[in-house]
Image (cartoon, grey):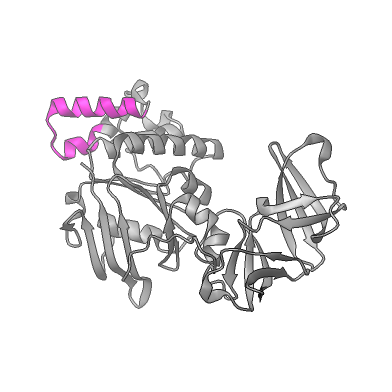
Amino acid sequence: MSNNISIRKAVKKYGENVVIPDLSVEIKEGEFFTLLGPSGCGKTTLLRMIAGFNSIEGGDFYFGDKRINDLDPSKRNIGMVFQNYAIFPHYTVRKNVEFGLKNKKFPKEKIKEQSEKFMKLMQIDQYADRMPERLSGGQQQRVALARALCIEPDVLLMDEPLSNLDAKLRVEMRTVIKNIQHNVGITTVYVTHDQEEAMAVSDRIAVMNAGVIQQIGTPKAIYQRPANLFVSTFIGRSNILNGTLQVENGKTFIVTKSGYRAEIKGVREEHRKNQNVVLSIRPEEFLLDRDATQGIEAVVDDCVFLGLNTHYFVHLTSGEEVEIIQESSIDSIIEPGSKIMLTLNTEKVNVFTEDGSENILTGVHNDRPED
């Protein structure tokens, strides 16, 4: 069985220090939900409040219809996977996986059946009698995941589970975790500071900063239409340029410091006025043309060939530095020192208020509960 999770007006304090001031979120049953943000933003604190490891200074936490604020962690029926695996070094793989089942006093036949099932699911059954010291980091994390899942928890909580693995293993394990979660269908709350990891595994992401949820949405929705400048710069790469918004004859234009002017559609009615704005432009949203006579003049400072794509680092006539990603072509890599002309894919550019607090375009999706 799986549960939805409701958190309403949560508050977390350490003395006078308020870590989470007022947080509400609804996590759907069976959903893979990720808390994403920089170190110290409160994501692990919130996870530990859900688990019962941290006190709750305000608000209400529910699993389904059941309020769990005062429920002992052992009675919340959660599975927990930690950053450091937390598997027992003196137990074999089998005994590690069986540990939670024995603690919950499952019948002996059920313990054997469940442990075998989840060891096979995690592809570690061939290591059943091996000690943890003889396992790789990825194999140890599979043991931790099997142990957490085999007790059939209502909720699975994962705190930076891949951060101790090397880059290749991280990619492999995030695929494993997503596939297993999809197959088992358990409500999962996942904490990470790695935006690429969050994009790869999540049904929805909550981007946090300073204890406040900035935006909740699917990876695609957050990437394409971030709610504010913080989300835009935290999710994926973004070039940030200062500019102005100009309204003429019912049309709206963006103008950069270098003098480039282009019509921008989809500006919300209340923001259609002359004003200073901040532009967020993904590296792939620059259109590069060596032979164009109009656009943003730039000079290539460096280029990095990465197989499928080539990354160009350029400076504009305004002095601003930007990164551009172009599909690689062996016979047409542009050398440093070359002058180029850029235009923008204005359908994908994001435009924020001067203070960066709000995206002024239509299409911004945010699943945050209303107060």
- Would you place residue 272 above or below residue 188 in this image? below
What residue is at 30 percent from the left and 58 percent from the top?
26
* Prevalent SS, magenta region: helix
Residue 11 at x, y percent in the picture: 31, 70
Locate residue 63: give its quadrant. Answer: bottom left
Residue 122 at x, y percent in the picture: 36, 29
Number of labels in the image equals 0
What residue is at 82 percent from the left and 66 percent from the top?
317
Observer-nearest of 172 and 139: 172
Locate residue 334: give its quadrant. Answer: top right
Q: Residue furthest top?
A: 126
Decide if residue 86 is on the left or right side of residue 346: left
Residue 175 at x, y percent in the picture: 45, 36
- Would you place residue 45 above or below residue 94 in this image? below
Decide if residue 182 is on the left or right side of residue 269: left
- Would you place residue 269 above or below residue 120 in this image? below
What residue is at 60 percent from the left and 66 percent from the top?
351
Residue 102 painted magenta: yes
What residue is at 67 percent from the left and 65 percent from the top?
263
**Residue 89 visible in the picture:** no
Q: Which region is colored magenta? A: 98-122
Observer-nearest of 267 and 217: 267
| Quarter in which the N terminus is drawn | top left
Residue 147 at x, y percent in the picture: 29, 36
Residue 85 painted magenta: no
Decide if residue 52 is on the left or right side of residue 160: left
Locate residue 316: give its quadrant. Answer: bottom right
**Residue 8 visible in the picture:** yes
| Quarter in which the C terminus is drawn | bottom left
